[in-house]
Image (cartoon, rainbow, N blue to C red):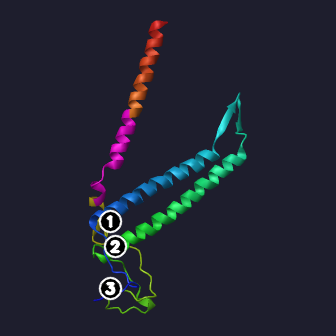
Amino acid sequence: MENNPDQASFLPFTKAERIQQLGEIDRDIVSLLRSTAQAVQTLGKQQAQGEDVAMTENKDHQVDVFQNSMNDFLRTLRTVNVNMKRQIWGLEEADIVTLDTNETSGADPESSKPSAGQRKAPLQPDGDGKIGGLDVGWLNSRSDKVEKDMEADLWNEAEAYLQRFLKASDTLQSA
């Protein structure tokens, strides 16, 4: 086989590259949540003035921040969508999951690959917690990042509560 500069050779991703890509998707999803939170926070910014609550003065700035947050959200959402599709196709190529095919589009019913004009159907669960050949429960049990983050947040809240309690008890004792 001769090297043709017009034809790129196919090199599948390694497991480490796939894991790195999934890590990037995870960070993008966190970015989605941040963008959403910033947009909602911008809409809800209020200043208390006596008993009345008035919106902040700089509405143009709020609109700009909201639009930038939503644009970032949509851009990141599109990226996550594309990257997740690529990961699913990679799982299918590795025969880890199988996607259903529609026989109505001219695909050979005996062939496992759809024809060129046919779309792949979404993954179908088997009713036992598996989607394709992938056990979702097993995958979820392998990551405890969310649990660790929540535990750290709870410890921080407990520490802040304890410090407020100690300050309050010191002020009562000194009075």
Q: Which amino acid does label 1 sit on?
A: Arg
**Pointer 2 local density, CA inside 10 Å: few below 14, some 14–19, many at least 20:** some
Question: In the rendered structure, does residue 66 fall within the stretch colored magenta?
Answer: no
Q: Which of marks 2 and 3 is nearer the N terminus?
A: 3
Where's residue 74, x and y in %? Answer: 55, 61
Asked if marks 1 and 2 touch (Cβ < 8 Å), the reply is: yes
**Pointer 1 local density, CA inside 10 Å: few below 14, some 14–19, many at least 20:** some
Q: Residue at x 39, y 33 (%)?
A: 156
Mark 1 → mark 2, Cα distance in angstroms: 9 Å
Where's residue 20, x and y in %? Answer: 34, 60
Q: What residue type is labelled 2?
A: Gly
Residue 173: image quadrant is top left
Q: In terms of secondary structure, where does tag 2 sit?
A: helix
Q: Name the residue under label 2.
A: 90
Q: Residue at x 59, y 56 (%)?
A: 70
Q: Earlier in the sequence, mark 3 or mark 1?
A: 3
In the rendered image, the vertical position of residue 40 relative to residue 54, given as above or below: below
